[in-house]
Image (tube, rainbow, N blue to C red):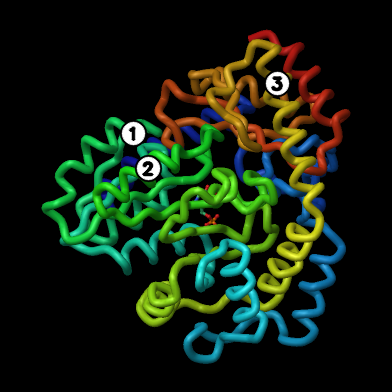
Amino acid sequence: MKLIKNEINDFNLRLKNAIDNDLYFYLQEIASEIGPKIKTSSGKEYIMLGSYSYLGLSAHPKIKEAAKKAIDKYGSGAGGVRLLAGTTPLHNELESRIADFTKKESAILFSSGYVANLSTISTLFGKNDYILIDQLDHASIIDGCKLSGAKFRPFRHNDMNDLRLKLSNADSFENTLICVDSVYSMDGDVSELPAIYDLAEQYGATVMVDEAHSLGVIGKNGRGIEEHFSYKISVDIIMGTLSKAIPSIGAFIASDKATIDYLKHNARAFVFSASLPPSAVAAALAALDIIENEPWIIQNLKDNYRFFIGGLKSLGYDTLESQTAIIPIMTKDEEATLKFCKYLFDRGIFISPIVFPAVPRNQSRLRAHVMATHTKEDLSRCLEIFSEFKP
Ligand code: PLP
């Protein structure tokens, strides 16, 4: 405890400093529905640029109704792990709907995206295996690799030459996995999946993608990266979350039936952890209905993020290579990021500051998330406020 005490003290000094200087933006209480505009507990209204609820479905009446009905029928909690006493017809229905939606044979639910990545990678891969991950992959993929005991190496972001180089010693391992995000959660750019797929074929590697920020966001009908590339590729394993475009909680893995059956009986986070509450499952099912039947919502989201990225670029902001609803606004300096964030908060924009350790120190930024339900007036108002900022 002595060692960690130093770290705790150092951290608390930094925390106090940020609070004293009015530059602390975390753990804000949001006291309204999550939509294009929100209210915090102070009663102040903000234009929301900080939510993963990309399709703006979080307060959709059909989804709320479905969740309430599930509570009426099944109660508040599932009361067990899936294998034993925690499976309702809703759980099985959602897995089968997800398999159809992702065009895979079968699917399994987990309690979160973090847990799905952690548990799947560590269940399927072990100490004789080799895992290559993009250097910007999500923390849960890195943690899954660590837990697996496999040898894992990051390759430079979206750099196929580096991936090829690192694949050249794949022969000395039993199995090789290439695991990437479809849309990168800090940069908002899209994985070079067709090239990754070709390399994987060449080296006999398995491909897994994390579709946390691509489902509902890219692809003609919001079905993610395979649809984005017109189904010219078919990855082996898809991880998708139920807490972003789909406004619930939980996640899934979709793959071939044999792999999913294996996970259902061997993934420790599935076998030894409680099942998702039926109301969350019902909400996810209702969201899938909307995504499948109302494609104009996805088109709205695309129009909105293209409009906002274009607007920021024309004001001279660096948004990296983002082509999606995640839009970095680079400041490259922690203090500058926090001051910019305060400027925006004071003017009614709720946005996330992203600083070390989430990104390297010289890559600090604000990160905006655009929603399908933002109006052009909301986004234009934000651009106007951004245009008035003088660093
Ligand atoms: N994968 C990516 C790329 C993410 O951005 C996140 C969370 O934001 C996760 C996985 C974890 O998902 P969850 O929040 O459901 O645990």
Alpha carbons under labels 3 and 2: distance apart: 29 Å
Q: Residue furthest left?
A: 172
Residue that appears at 50% across and 25% down: 364
User: What is the number of the mark on residue 160?
Assistant: 1
In the image: residue 316, left or right of residue 155: right
Alpha carbons under labels 1 and 3: distance apart: 28 Å
Question: How many numbered circles does the render carry?
Answer: 3
Please name the residue that numbered disc 3 is placed on. 310
In the image: residue 216, left or right of residue 321: right
Q: Amino acid at mark 3?
A: Gly
Query: Where residue 96 sits in the image (x, y, percent)?
Result: 60, 75
Near-viewer residue (50 or 344): 50
Q: Amino acid at mark 2?
A: Ile
Query: Where residue 13 sits in the image (x, y, percent)?
Result: 45, 33
Residue that appears at 81% across and 38% down: 374
Quadrant of the image containing the C terminus: top right
Please name the residue that numbered disc 2 is placed on. 196
Compared with 322, 132 (above or below) is below
Residue that appears at 78% across and 25% down: 382
Crowd rating for badge 2 (residues with CA inside 10 Å; few <14, some 14–19, many 20+) = many
Compared with 129, 338 (above or below) is above
- Asked if residue 272 can be seen in this view, the reply is no
Q: Nearer the viewer, mark 1 or mark 3?
A: 1
